[in-house]
Amino acid sequence: MPAVPSESGTSGSRTRSWWGWGYVDAHPDDAECVALGALLPGTLARPLPVPRVADLAVARPGVTPPASLERIVTADPEARAAHAMGKAYRDVIRALRGRAGRIPDLVAYPTDDREVAELLDWAGDQGVAVIPFGGGSSVVGGVEYRGEAHRAVLSLDLTAMGRVLEIDPTSRSARIQAGAFGPALEDQLRPHGLTLRHFPQSFEFSTLGGWLATRAGGHYATVHTHIDDFVQSLRVVTPAGTGTSWRLPASGAGPSPDRFFLGSEGTLGVITEAWMRVQERPRHKASASVSFADFDRALEAVRAVAQSDLAPANCRLLDPGEALLAGAASDGSSVLVLGFESATGPVDGRLADALDLARAHGGRGGAPADDREAPADAAVSAWRSAFLRMPYLRDGLARMGAVVETFETATTWDRLPALIAAVRAEVGATAHRATGHPATVNCRLTHVYPDGAAPYFTVAVAGRPGAEAEIWDDIKAVATDVLHRHQATVTHHHAVGRDHRPGYDLQRPEPFALVLRAAKAALDPRHVLNPGVLVD
Amino acid sequence: MPAVPSESGTSGSRTRSWWGWGYVDAHPDDAECVALGALLPGTLARPLPVPRVADLAVARPGVTPPASLERIVTADPEARAAHAMGKAYRDVIRALRGRAGRIPDLVAYPTDDREVAELLDWAGDQGVAVIPFGGGSSVVGGVEYRGEAHRAVLSLDLTAMGRVLEIDPTSRSARIQAGAFGPALEDQLRPHGLTLRHFPQSFEFSTLGGWLATRAGGHYATVHTHIDDFVQSLRVVTPAGTGTSWRLPASGAGPSPDRFFLGSEGTLGVITEAWMRVQERPRHKASASVSFADFDRALEAVRAVAQSDLAPANCRLLDPGEALLAGAASDGSSVLVLGFESATGPVDGRLADALDLARAHGGRGGAPADDREAPADAAVSAWRSAFLRMPYLRDGLARMGAVVETFETATTWDRLPALIAAVRAEVGATAHRATGHPATVNCRLTHVYPDGAAPYFTVAVAGRPGAEAEIWDDIKAVATDVLHRHQATVTHHHAVGRDHRPGYDLQRPEPFALVLRAAKAALDPRHVLNPGVLVD
């Protein structure tokens, strides 16, 4: 058995959960679960027990690795269980109900491109499915094998390749291995005064490779949103060969090679490293919040800010339900949180201009906090803590038998109000009908663009014991249908995986489906890479 | 014979040149050509005569269109000659020397998607090559058939599809047909207070479809540079079917379908329309210029501006030779032209900050012009006129037997100084060796990024009579080799076409070459679309 890197078991001294979000020591305990359950009428009286690997029927591996790869491959049940699924609500509730997905036969931890290529060759020879795996934080069934077509399943864990290999301070670029977790790569950039500044909610538990393969969205509301825009060059190992694009600030030479592998979700090749555009660390910050009596007027305010050239780092609109949960308002107001950051100069002027726009659309309050003072930072920090805590609370509610999950989308401004209203009405009605309990459907805008915005929905309702996953599937099917009817994307930044395939197949233009199938056949002719994701 | 749209002959009352840049009435006359030639030692005493279509051996078409398509197809020799080549120096000098490329057999002017699809079907049945054609301003051999593999050649002119079909002011978006020329689409957006704000040098003579198919770069130095970023949705007609992507501000659902067709240069399908992100028209402008005794220090100043968040609309660095030609400096200084624009608020502060950065790196001068005063606008306007006049002057010099052409690239900051020095030395030496005359190699930076910049080179040298095209080919081969050795892209915004294929094949990662070939086979199985471009 190899030396297993920390992320599948412990990180430093903290232990990662194999079935739920994040660190075991951060999970709500039984008493906290009960308190959470009390917020949602109809949940269980006592939490479901924490599942144990020992209770899983982990079968003997259906295949053995060749001697040359033995030292980087393990059949350890704990490691295999931790690689069986992602971290969606669907995954968590299935683990809690003793219905985990198919456990991979083996987990491999390659340390370089050559080993990745060898593993792909071996898998092709043996008919073994390969599931590329970064931090395993997928919420769309992206890292779980489903089906029977392969004789065995190998989880290809990239986290032994987690270093920043090279930094070019002149061009503000860094060559980073795909398996680097968010905190580790920031730790390696910090001494140089640089940052990738990509902070998805999963930041602690996801990797650069995962961000690239899924076209992740970061924390920032404008400009610095999509990981795509910060890729200078990619290195990809495919069953048909390895390639590296040139390090370029821009190019007009044919369709972008990088943009084709970004979002390919491990189906066309394994991204092993990238040159990323990094930034000077912001020194100037300013933030404030504004409340609105009317959500639709708040949408107009956000649109005005998004269509200006003020480029807020944070422009997060919370509807009354979200504002209540975040402790930002309890009077039925919607709350807009505005934040600006810069490494160049003070941002107070931009904040003031944005607040003027918000007030012109009926916003109240919002005295800008001086960017050198503590309060704004404290508010942002409190909000950030709550944000990072959310998935843990979701798992606590899951232990109380609740159905609680989020989904996100994006659409143009002209269609946004009708979309949000339709989601609230139809998803809420479905959740209520399926459970007999009142359902909460909250909405926040997380990312904004001159031409549209990305709403993020949270659904919470008490489930029927044992039927929670199926109830969520019903709710999700309705949500997918609403998004399709409004031509809102099936995902703004969570990826397609296996869970979003029905919506994705409706959304994807047919000529591009032909391209993907042809590319799959050319790059992965033995169909071993992440079967079932994106293409068949 | 069909009603031929104006762009192949006359636009309003002005006649387009079939062999040279732009309008016939804007061409330098013989006396001006002689004056231009006097600037370059060794050129001819008298200009080469203006070529005439009557002198071309325009053969009878090798194929006839079916009756159903007759009304949109012409075999008129003038129209066919005007669709034989693009507008590179190489094209102009070949026309002047009576060596024009293969004249297409027919020119079609479809008016809707159905006609485009019918033409593709017919061409597939007949083995006829189809060259999609917008404004015909390609400078990379993108619209010229080469080879013998097809029994006939059809130029597919999209300019009968030139309308803005729909405007969504709420989402700041417009649905525009691919054949719309720059001025026509701006004219249609202006009454709504909107602009696409994409101003390539070819603006008057190129179309939206051409910009999209070649991933064009606009006039602006930062942020608003690449047409790619302003695409909300594309409609593409391929021989295997037609598809439209959803109108979305952003999506993380698989690899971007649009990004795969952007830059496909008519090889995978015909882009017939797009929803484009448009903008409010800028109301605030400010500009100034700064001079530098040392070009390398000027590069450092530009890098500082590019790595700030000031986002200048113009950040154009002219080396001493360029500055002399532009009338910006005659003392051997390099000149940095900075400009800012906004629809949101005054930009004087941003200009002042940028000037501070420039002065900190040795820049002199640069009192910012008040954005309501005339001088700055006048300077920008003068510069813009000169910029738009350049291709006409190139053709005047070509008539004097000069070899005069530009090429552009992009690379990261760390490699930029060495790249520029190598181009100057090696291209200059080759031009001198090939002609026996002193050569001018000038450089300007046109687009800047936090991680690099796009230098634009101009080469001018007297040719050897009759050998001008071959001399340029030799110079270009050396330039391509220098770019390859420095891993600088073969094109930042001019596209690949046929002329850049050798450099492109070196640059493109092999797995992506497999993807392109597979996509070509899937979408264009009878290989009729723009043969020889990007893939074989």
Image (tube, coloured by chain):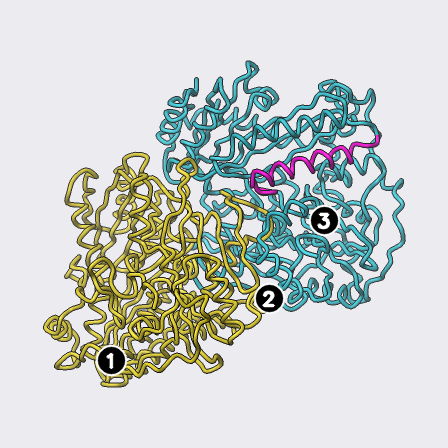
Chain colours: A yellow, B cyan
Q: Secondary structure at mark 3?
A: loop
On the image, which quarter does residue A345 sit in?
top left
Tell me which label, 1 or 2, sits earlier in the chain.
1
Q: Chain of mark 3?
A: B
Q: Which chain is disc 1 placed on?
A: A
The image quadrant where one finds the N terminus of chain B is: bottom right
What residue appears at the point 65 percent right and 47 percent down from the top-left corner? B496
The picture places residue A395, in percent across and down from the top left corner, at 22, 71
In the depicted view, which residue is nearer to us: A291 or A225? A225
Q: What residue range appears in magenta? A: B466-493
Query: Mark 2 falls within which chain?
Result: A
Q: Looking at the picture, which amino acid does disc 1 mark?
A: Ala
| Label disc, if present, on residue A54 of the rendered structure | 1
Measured from the top left, where is residue B524 in percent x and y? 68, 64
Decide if residue A365 is on the left or right side of residue B304: left
Badge 2 crowding class, 10 Å Cα cut-off, few under 14, some 14 to 19, many 20 or more, is many
Cα–Cα gap, marks 1 and 3: 67 Å
Question: Badge 1: how crowded within 10 Å, few (<14), some, or many (20+)?
Answer: few
**B478 in the magenta segment:** yes
Inspect the magenta stretch and tell me whether residue B399 lies in it.
Answer: no
Please say whether residue B511 is visible from this viewpoint.
yes
Amino acid type at image mark 3: Val
A23 w.r.t. A42: above or below? above
Give the left or right position of residue B296, taking residue B209 as reference: left
Residue A522: numbered disc: 2
User: As shown in the figure, which amino acid type bears the numbered disc 2?
Assistant: Ala
